[in-house]
């Protein structure tokens, strides 16, 4: 389609029809955000890579069945959510927050920041800690909202709960993040 | 293609501020080796599929293309037959009043122009007030006229093999909006009742054999889909707007209560969930099984639906 940029949905349909370059285009666009989403959930690079690969394998496997009923992003993150759910099930529980998380964060060097003033580095460190302390559901919701820029409806579709539940999870998560960012 | 709508609620100021910090957090990237592995897998999948695609289209000359051609011929036959069984409106006397010479010359041009609105109006009126069945006289003409149709090509014996080669076409049709297929199916059903009798009377007629051989399976599929669509669609208007609204409300209420009923199934693993759907089926809870399967498809878009459950979705 010269001159017109193809949407994600067009690309996925094209891949389903046999266009390998369409998949490459999709992959390049979504690999970073999806990987970060995984890493922030499982907190471990190796496991994140394993789950990330599984998700794309499922995308590849489902290429012919794909129907653009929803945004491709919603579809992709729904698969990721399911894979994560399976992962937590297999683990029987979500791993606890590392005991030394606070200490490790405190040890991070930040020589350029004046006391009592939050540098960008400090901000990031606090946010990371705050995220790690959120319950899994709230954490996933806030990541999908803030990092993936998804609507409440889309998050509801991905996580399989109602819009009001998403709204409530998001509100609690935001309150906790704000508190930790501005103690 | 349906273009999905953009998100309807953009981030507010608070969210934007946190999003800015969040996006600056180091998250890492997949390794180059992993990138290569995934891209290779995507290409391998297509490569494995290529022979199948070729096989599908290799059958095209004798299978798929023949099937498409036959389908077009059958639809044409049904359409023309339907018109022939439909008596011209009394306020449009031109074709009958014209002398024979003029009739034969202008028939082809005049028919579509004059009868199209009439047919259309009849279809639109159909749900509200069923039109009287067409008078029997025109039926006598049908076999004679239908002989002039373009023959649906080769031997009818090849017909049963025709639908197999193009599952993609099936999928495409299945995703078409329901109203269109309902109208077409209704037309087919109507034809079935009005045309079948004279056709049966004229035993041994080539047109009938060819049409029947091809269209039986096609028609069953279309009617099956139409029945599903009719089941899903609101019932015909009986009590005016209020009646329709009440029916819609009742329908939505039933659907909502079913959705609630099957919601706990979603907490199961995918495999256990499918088993649960089978259990529902076995216990006679077809509606629950269908609702649960719909939810399953929604929650596990990457999963293939097992063959034994596909009929639940009308596939």
Image: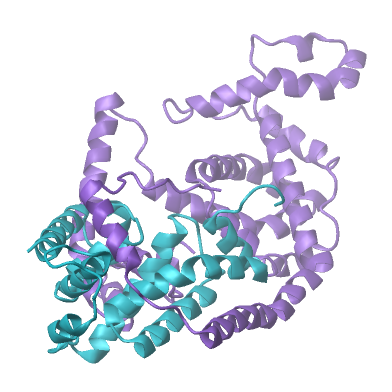
Chain colours: A cyan, B purple
Instruction: From the top left corner, tell me how far across and down residue B273 is, in percent.
Output: 29, 77
Of all residues, the one furthest to the left in this rendering is A183
Residue B96 visible in the snapshot: yes
* Nearest to the observer: residue B168 or residue A78: A78
Q: Quadrant of residue B163?
A: bottom right
Residue B34 location in percent, x, y?
52, 85
Q: Where does the image place residue A57, in percent across and percent down from the top left?
A: 49, 80
* Residue located 59% across and 25% down the image: B120
Q: Is residue A68 left or right of residue B257?
A: right
Of B85 and A73, the residue lying toward us = A73
> Is A40 on the left-hand or right-hand side of B102?
left
Where, by quadrant of the figure, is residue B76 drawn? top right
Please give the name of the residue rendered at 48% of the width and 72% of the height, measured from the top-left corner: A31
Q: Is residue B115 above or below residue A40?
A: above
Does residue A130 sit above or below B219 in this rendering?
below
Q: How many marks?
A: 0
Q: Visible in this render: residue B278? A: no
User: What residue appears at the point 34 percent right and 31 percent down from the top-left corner?
Assistant: B237
| Quarter holding residue A32 | bottom left
Q: Residue at x 24, y 63 (%)?
A: A142
Q: Is B93 on the left or on the right of A153, as rendered?
A: right
Whole-percent x, y for residue A108 in the image: 23, 81
Locate residue B229 relative to residue A65 in the image: left or right. Answer: left
Quadrant of the drawing holding the C terminus of chain A: bottom left
């Amino acid at each position: 389609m010269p001159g017109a940029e193809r949407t994600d949905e067009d690309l996925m349909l094209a891949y389903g029809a046999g266009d390998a370059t369409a998949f490459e285009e999709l992959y390049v666009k979504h690999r970073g955000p999806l990987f970060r989403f995984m890493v922030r959930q499982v907190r471990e690079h190796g496991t994140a890579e394993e789950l990330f690969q599984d998700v794309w394998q499922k995308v590849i496997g489902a290429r012919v069945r794909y129907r653009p009923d929803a945004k491709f992003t919603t579809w992709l993150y729904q698969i990721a959510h399911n894979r994560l759910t399976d992962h937590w099930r297999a683990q029987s529980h979500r791993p606890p927050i590392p005991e030394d998380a606070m200490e490790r964060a405190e040890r991070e060097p930040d020589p350029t920041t004046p006391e009592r003033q939050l540098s960008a580095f400090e901000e990031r460190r606090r946010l990371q800690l705050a995220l790690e302390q959120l319950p899994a559901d709230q954490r996933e919701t806030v990541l999908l909202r803030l990092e993936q820029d998804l609507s409440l409806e889309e998050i509801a579709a991905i996580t399989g709960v109602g819009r009001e539940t998403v709204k409530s999870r998001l509100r609690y998560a935001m309150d906790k993040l704000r508190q930790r960012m501005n103690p | 293609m349906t273009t999905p709508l953009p998100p309807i609620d953009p981030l507010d100021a608070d969210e934007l501020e946190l999003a800015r910090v969040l996006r600056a957090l180091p998250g890492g990237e997949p390794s180059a080796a992993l990138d290569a592995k995934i891209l290779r897998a995507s290409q391998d999948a297509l490569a494995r599929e290529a022979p199948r695609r070729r096989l599908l289209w290799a059958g095209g000359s004798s299978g798929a293309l023949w099937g498409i051609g036959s389908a077009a011929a059958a639809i044409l036959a049904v359409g023309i037959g339907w018109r022939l069984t439909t008596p011209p409106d009394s306020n449009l006397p031109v074709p009958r009043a014209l002398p024979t010479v003029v009739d034969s010359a202008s028939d082809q041009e005049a028919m579509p122009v004059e009868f199209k609105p009439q047919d259309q109006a009849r279809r639109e009126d159909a749900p509200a007030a069923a039109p009287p069945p067409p008078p029997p006289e025109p039926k006598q003409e049908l076999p004679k006229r239908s002989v002039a149709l373009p023959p649906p090509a080769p031997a009818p014996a090849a017909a049963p093999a025709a639908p197999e080669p193009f599952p993609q076409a099936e999928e495409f049709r299945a995703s078409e909006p329901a109203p269109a297929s309902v109208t077409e199916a209704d037309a087919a059903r109507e034809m079935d009742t009005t045309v079948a009798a004279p056709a049966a009377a004229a035993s041994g007629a080539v047109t009938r054999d060819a049409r029947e051989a091809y269209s039986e399976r096609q028609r069953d599929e279309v009617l099956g889909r139409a029945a599903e669509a009719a089941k899903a669609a609101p019932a015909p208007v009986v009590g005016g707007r209020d009646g329709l609204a009440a029916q819609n409300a009742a329908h939505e209420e039933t659907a909502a209560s079913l959705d609630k009923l099957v919601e706990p199934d979603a907490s199961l693993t995918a495999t256990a969930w499918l088993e649960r759907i089978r259990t529902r089926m076995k216990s006679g809870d077809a509606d629950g099984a269908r609702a649960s399967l719909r939810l399953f498809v929604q929650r596990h878009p990457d999963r293939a639906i097992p063959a034994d459950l596909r009929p639940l979705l009308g596939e």
